Image (tube, helix red, strand yellow):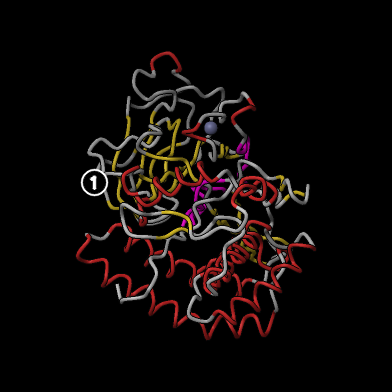
Amino acid sequence: MAKGVKIPFDVPVEVTEPNLSSLIYNLPLNHPDGVAIIQGPLNLNAGCSHGYLNCLYALDFATCTPPGKILAARSGVVVALHDEGIADGAFYNVDSSGDGFGNWVAVKHEFNEVSFYAHLNEIKVAIGDHLESGQEIGIEGSTGQAGARHLHFSVHRLIGEKSENICPYNTSQYESIPYRLQCCTHTDGQLQIIDIRTFAKINDKNTNKDQEKLFHVSNYHHPLLDRLREMYKEDQESCFQWINAEEDKKDEYSNLIMNIRRKHNHELKEIIQQYGWPTYESIGTEGSEALWLLVQHQDEDVEFQKLCLGLLKSRVEQGQASYKNYAYLLDRTRMNEKLPQIYGTQWGGNKGEIAPYQVENIGQLDERRSQAGLCSLSEYKELLKKAYHFNDEDFK
Ligand SMILES: [Zn+2]
């Protein structure tokens, strides 16, 4: 790390959901006559079969005409599977170690993401197979705890150390994460891209408005959204490289991070000049989050950050941007101007003395955080520990 460059403690760990998938997945089922979503994401209190931590963001799909072919949602490597052989129907009671998921397959992708396909009646791949996106994995089924034939699909991210025995539904190894799903459909002969993003919670308690529908059929400004996704991915990739690097390699990755952010500065300015701060309607919560993160990282151009802060504030007031993002950017600009932060979102320091930067009126901090829809400071510390592989001794 170059002297004077701050450690980027700012992977957006504090969101209602765990981090969104870095990747876009394709519909994992063929659909000559259509595919129905038969169960969406529900929260822990819902008391339904997706009300568990290992499948919070799972979707159940069923083809209209059986049997459906299960397809790899993205290229990757088969890292684990559970196969009790070909089944004609449900074998709920003989799901000996599939833990309710029957015959299942796990495929590993970039960023420690794993896609998970369950209840298959037949598996056509083996551990170690390299799959292309769209390649057949098996046949849709009803094995395990499945009341009817369907595909249970979810995306998971590896937590902590790599494990030899990958088991995506084991929540101590993997967390179920929200993901982006892309599929094509024909409407009036036009090819459309539909993004499906899953949420555990959709109501913004600050505005009391739905942040986004569970399944959002997009009418977005796609070139802008695609560009933001690309830049976001580039930024996050460099962050993850830094997080996972050996101590003596950190400097190298810090420089990479800074070079990417400098490269993004010009383009971000063009975007803001052309569009202002785009609305949810034009780029979705996903694009809005991506843009916020990229601006949050423009620490070498505080004037630009402050310009964006004003634009973002107006959008928050219109219900077209996130109050949380505003809180983070406000703290960031104040920190960069050597002023005390308001919401306690900015932390720093070397290992052993990690702590929040100076906070204004610290007595009411958790109250302010709550107003902004942020978790308590102690909960946030836990999130930082998890995201950066820190332990208690690393903190002041
Ligand atoms: Zn399911």
Write the residue at 36% across / 43% down: 159
Whole-percent x, y for residue 166 in the image: 29, 37
Mark 1 — residue? 128
Magenta stretch containing residue 148, yes or no? no
Write the residue at 32% across / 24% down: 84
Whole-percent x, y for residue 309 in the image: 66, 72
Range of magenta residues: 17-41
Whole-percent x, y for residue 197 in the image: 59, 51
* Residue lying furthest left: 248
Return the residue nearer the eye: 334 or 151. 334
Tag 1: amino acid: Gly
SS category of the residue bearing label 1: loop
**Residue 289 sits in quarter:** bottom right
Can you say whether 61 is above or below 99 in the image? below
User: Is the CB–ligand 1 distance for label 1 below 8 Å?
Assistant: no
Q: Main secondary structure of the magenta part?
A: loop
Can you say whether 268 is above or below 116 in the image? below
Return the residue nearer the eye: 325 or 346. 346
**Residue 344 sits in quarter:** bottom right
Location of the N terminus by quadrant is bottom left
Magenta stretch containing residue 36, yes or no? yes
Write the residue at 49% across / 40% down: 153
Q: Horizontally, is 327 left or right of 75 in the view?
A: right
Return the residue nearer the eye: 234 or 244. 244
For label 1, count other residues whose C-alpha is less than 10 Å away and answer few (under 14), some (14-19) or many (20+). few
**Residue 350 sits in quarter:** bottom left
Can you say whether 312 is above or below 10 in the image? below
Whole-percent x, y for residue 185 in the image: 63, 58
